[in-house]
Structures are given as C-alpha cells and as structure tokens.
Image (cartoon, rainbow, N blue to C red):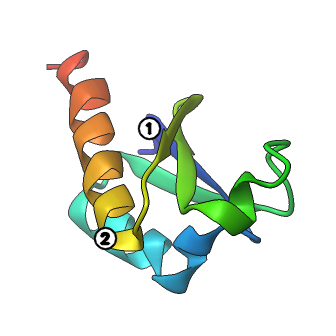
Amino acid sequence: MGIIVVEICDGSLITQIDLESILEAEYPEVAVIENSCLSFCGMCAKSPYAMVNGKRVFAKTTEECLEKIRKQIETELAVYS
C-alpha cells in the first residue's frame, strides 16, 4: 500500500541493516526508498537516521534508530485507524 514512506540516504549508517526488508515485512503500509542524498549534509556519517513521512528520526545506534523508526511508523499509522 505504501501510505508511510521511509526515506534513507545511501550514505547513512542506517544502511548497515536491511531496513527495507525489515520494515516492509513488518508493515505492509510502508515503502522504504533509498536516495543518494537527503540534504542533511554530514548527518549521514555521524548517526543513523531516516525520514518517516518527512519527519527526521535519528539515534546514536542503528538498533535504537530502528526502534524509533518503528515508533514513528506506529504514530503515523494511528492517524488511519
């Protein structure tokens, strides 16, 4: 369906995990899109991050970032229920 869009920069530390497979398997409403740049210069190298429906989600570790992304997805999905 893809009502939630998760965008990741191909230079972000979040690419250490297969975010697309993880999130799209857990949430059929999610589409993960990898871009070459999301215009947050320098952030890619410093911490894992993603954009969830235009909202920046970041953390110190990849695992923590994944959990924050899941929480933001749940918040976004709550609008549709």
Residue 27 picture location, percent across and down: 27, 55
Looking at this view, is 21 or 75 the one in front?
Answer: 75
| Picture residue at 31% right of the left edge, 26% below the top | 76
Q: Which residue is mark 1?
A: 4
Residue at the limit of the structure toward the top, as seen here: 79
Residue shown at 31% from the left, 36% from the top: 72
Judge the density around disc 1: few (<14), some (14-19), many (≥20) Cα neighbours within 10 Å: many
Amino acid type of the residue that numbered disc 1 sits on in the rendered structure: Ile
Q: Quadrant of residue 77?
A: top left
Query: x, y (%) of residue 32?
Result: 54, 58
Quadrant, the C terminus: top left
| Percent of width and height locating residue 39 | 85, 42
The residue tagged with tag 1: helix, strand or loop?
A: strand
- Disc 2 residue crowd, few under 14, some 14–19, many 20+, Cα 10 Å: few
**Residue at 71% from the left image edge and 53% from the top image edge:** 43
Percent coordinates x, y for residue 57 in the rendering: 47, 42
